[in-house]
């Protein structure tokens, strides 16, 4: 476990947004926005000079892998890409041994895993911060970029109505945590049997989260400021695809749905998209879509996370 130090987020793990207070969540977003503006203005802060992270991937990635790498480079640091093929963790050597090697070389570890418990095991052993780059349970870095996008789109990330339609998966679970921190109203529409994680939901409600789970996706979208969807078949669920495609009939978001949103309402998706399943290609390329702003903001949000957790201050 990384050792928390007095200065806010420095030295901490980021495995779940529920690890953060609302103030810390907002602080990462504001740091990300500031770094984005500074970069656009030609400022080149080297907040992570001589800092190094290891990036471990058990699964594929375009956005997470690229943006962590680019973020480290642009802030003067360096990243080392490792994949299951390279290190064979849990097979060639134990996660504990991997942790005790890496902590001697790097200042942080970002990992994308199947089981969330693999991440918690890594974090338990590693003496440097561990950042969740997606697990089967949660995807905190995605929602930081998404709330940064909402903050820019609406001028605030408070008092928004968000409709998430689709599978109650890692992205949906993280919506539950993020909405609780930001104080947004979250309506989740999913077929029975595909609800978000019970524990995540119960913990969020205990913290005052306003989260509704319904079965009618069009009703969930009515008057929403954000209509958000994600794939029905996440990485690792390919064998279950037939059953899932049947269960999610009626959940394909098309641009007609956008007429039901609030006047400022936008469409969001974390990508990759499976066109013809959770949404059409027209939805992603529609004028009310901010999907590529989200993708761009992965870079800036990654910078915010890295600076808050890893910079020397
Ligand atoms: N949204 C997201 O995490 O994309 P990647 O899987 O490509 O990293
Ligand atoms: N729910 C998707 C998110 C991909 C970024 C998955 O886990 O495959």
Image (cartoon, rainbow, N blue to C red):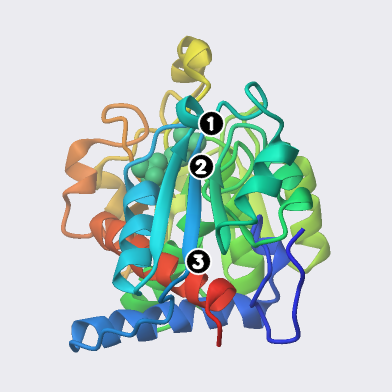
- Identify the image quadrant of the C terminus: bottom right
Q: Residue 130: percent from the left, percent from the top?
A: 63, 56
Q: Are marks 1 and 2 in contact (CB under 8 Å)?
A: yes
Occupied quadrant, residue 177: bottom right
The CA distance from mark 1 to mark 2 is 9 Å
Q: Residue 296: percent from the left, percent from the top?
A: 27, 62
Which residue shows up at 26% across the image and 30% down it? 275
Q: Residue 213: percent from the left, percent from the top?
A: 64, 46
- Residue placed most toward the observer, 109 or 26: 109
Choose the circle earlier in sequence order: 1 or 2. Answer: 2
For label 1, the SS is: helix
For label 2, the SS is: strand
Occupied quadrant, residue 229: top left
Q: Residue 257: percent from the left, percent from the top?
A: 31, 47
**Residue at which label 2 appears:** 56
Which residue shows up at 43% across the image and 23% down it? 249
Q: Is residue 119 left or right of residue 272?
A: right
> Which label number is shown at residue 161?
3
- Residue placed most toward the observer, 143 or 287: 143
**Residue at which label 1 appears:** 87
Which residue shows up at 55% across the image and 82% down it? 312
Image vertical order of residue 303 relative to residue 44, above or below: above
The CA distance from mark 2 to mark 3 is 35 Å
Ligand 1 found in image quarter: top left
Q: Is residue 130 left or right of residue 57?
A: right
Mark nearer the viewer, 2 or 3: 2
The outermost residue toward the right is 206
Mark 1 C-beta closer than 8 Å to ligand 1: no
* Residue 183 visible in the displayed image: no
Image vertical order of residue 184 relative to residue 135, above or below: below
Mark nearer the viewer, 1 or 3: 1
């Amino acid at each position: 476990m990384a050792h928390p130090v007095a200065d806010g987020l420095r030295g901490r793990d980021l495995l779940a947004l529920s690890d953060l207070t609302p103030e810390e969540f907002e602080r990462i977003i504001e740091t990300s926005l500031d770094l984005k503006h500074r970069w656009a203005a030609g400022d080149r802060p080297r907040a992570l000079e001589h800092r190094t992270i290891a990036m471990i991937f058990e699964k594929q990635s375009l956005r997470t892998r690229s943006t962590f790498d680019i973020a480290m480079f642009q802030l003067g640091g360096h990243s080392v890409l490792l994949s299951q093929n390279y290190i064979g963790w849990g097979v060639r050597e134990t996660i504990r041994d991997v942790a005790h090697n890496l902590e001697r070389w790097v200042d942080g570890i970002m990992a994308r895993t199947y089981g969330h418990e693999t991440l918690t095991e890594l974090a338990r052993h590693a003496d440097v911060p561990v950042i969740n780059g997606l697990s089967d349970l949660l995807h905190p870095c995605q929602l930081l970029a998404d709330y940064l996008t909402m903050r820019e789109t609406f001028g605030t990330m408070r008092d928004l109505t968000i409709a998430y339609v689709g599978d109650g998966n890692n992205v949906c679970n993280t919506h539950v945590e993020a909405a609780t921190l930001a104080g947004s109203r979250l309506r989740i529409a999913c077929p029975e049997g595909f609800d978000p994680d019970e524990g995540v939901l119960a913990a969020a409600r205990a913290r005052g989260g306003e989260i509704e789970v319904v079965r009618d996706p069009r009703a969930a979208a009515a008057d929403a400021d954000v209509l958000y969807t994600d794939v029905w078949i996440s990485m690792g669920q390919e064998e279950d695809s037939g059953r899932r495609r049947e269960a999610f009939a009626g959940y394909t978001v098309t641009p007609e749905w956008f007429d039901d949103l609030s006047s400022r309402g936008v469409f969001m998706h974390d990508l990759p998209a499976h066109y013809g399943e959770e949404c059409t290609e027209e939805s992603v390329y529609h004028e009310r879509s901010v999907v590529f702003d989200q993708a761009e903001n992965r870079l800036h949000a990654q910078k915010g996370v890295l600076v808050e957790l890893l910079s020397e201050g």
